[in-house]
Amino acid sequence: MVQLQFIESEYKLLDNFGNEDILTEFKQWFLKKTMTLDDIHDLKKGIVNSKLERYIYESIISYIDKYYDRYLLSLTNIKKQFLPQLLDKTHSRFIIGVNDDGTISGIPIIPKYLENLKVKYKNRFLVIIQTLLVYIIQKEIQL
C-alpha cells in the first residue's frame, strides 16, 4: 500500500526527527530560486508574497521529482544481509525538510498547496510502485 502523508504541526523547527536508516531517507529542503532583498525583508515580517509562494511550491515539486524516484530505486538494491531486519516493516519513509543529522529544518509550505501536492503525486507514486513491483518480479524470475 502506498501512503502519501504530509506531517503538519507534529514537530517544531530544530527538533530532532531521529536517524536515517535503510528505510528512512532525509532530504534537507532549500528554496531553488533566489529571493530579492524585498522578499527577505517581507519574510522576516512573516509576509509571504505570491511570488515566494510559487517559488516554494515549485521547489517542493522539484525535490520530489528529483529525489523520490531515486529513493524508490535504492530500495530495490538493499543488500540481502539487511533483509531480515525488514521483515516486520510495512513501509519506508522519504522525508523532505530534515537534514542528514535528523534536525528538522522544515518547509514553509502554504496550506492551500497541500491538497494540490497530494493529488498531483498520489497517482504518480502508484504508477512508480507498480512499475517497480513488475521489475522486482522479473528480476526474481531471472534469478
Image: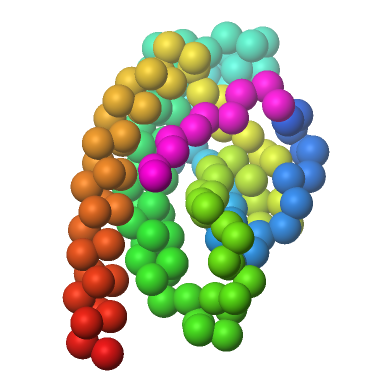
Tell me where residue 93 appears, x and y as whole percent: 54, 50
Q: List the single residue furthest toward the bottom.
A: 143
Of residues 72 and 106, the one drawn nearer to the viewer in this rendering? 72
Tell me where residue 20 appears, x and y as whole percent: 66, 60
Magenta stretch: helix, strand or loop mostly: loop
Q: List the single residue furthest toward the right.
A: 15
Where's the C terminus, which quadrant? bottom left
Q: Is residue 8 above or below residue 93?
A: above
| Residue at (73, 45) in percent of width and height | 17
The stretch drawn in magenta includes residue 26: no
83 horizontally vs 104: left or right? left
| Residue 69, picture quadrant | bottom left
Q: Is residue 76 above or below residue 64?
A: below
Where's the N terminus, which quadrant? top left
53 horizontally vs 46: left or right? left
| Residue at (57, 85) in percent of width and height | 81
Tell me where residue 116 appears, x and y as whole percent: 33, 21
Specify the color scheme.
Answer: rainbow
Of residues 126 and 33, the one drawn nearer to the viewer in this rendering? 126
| Residues in magenta, as a range | 1-10
| Residue at (79, 38) in percent of width and height | 15
Using the rendered image of the protein, determine whether residue 37 is visible from the camera's viewpoint. Answer: no
| Residue at (59, 41) in percent of width and height | 97
How many numbered discs? 0
| Residue 52, picture quadrant | top left
Tell me where residue 61 appears, x and y as whole percent: 35, 37
Of residues 83 and 29, the one drawn nearer to the viewer in this rendering? 83
Of residues 4 and 117, the one drawn nearer to the viewer in this rendering? 4
The stretch drawn in magenta includes residue 2: yes
Using the rendered image of the protein, determine whether residue 121 is visible from the camera's viewpoint. Answer: yes
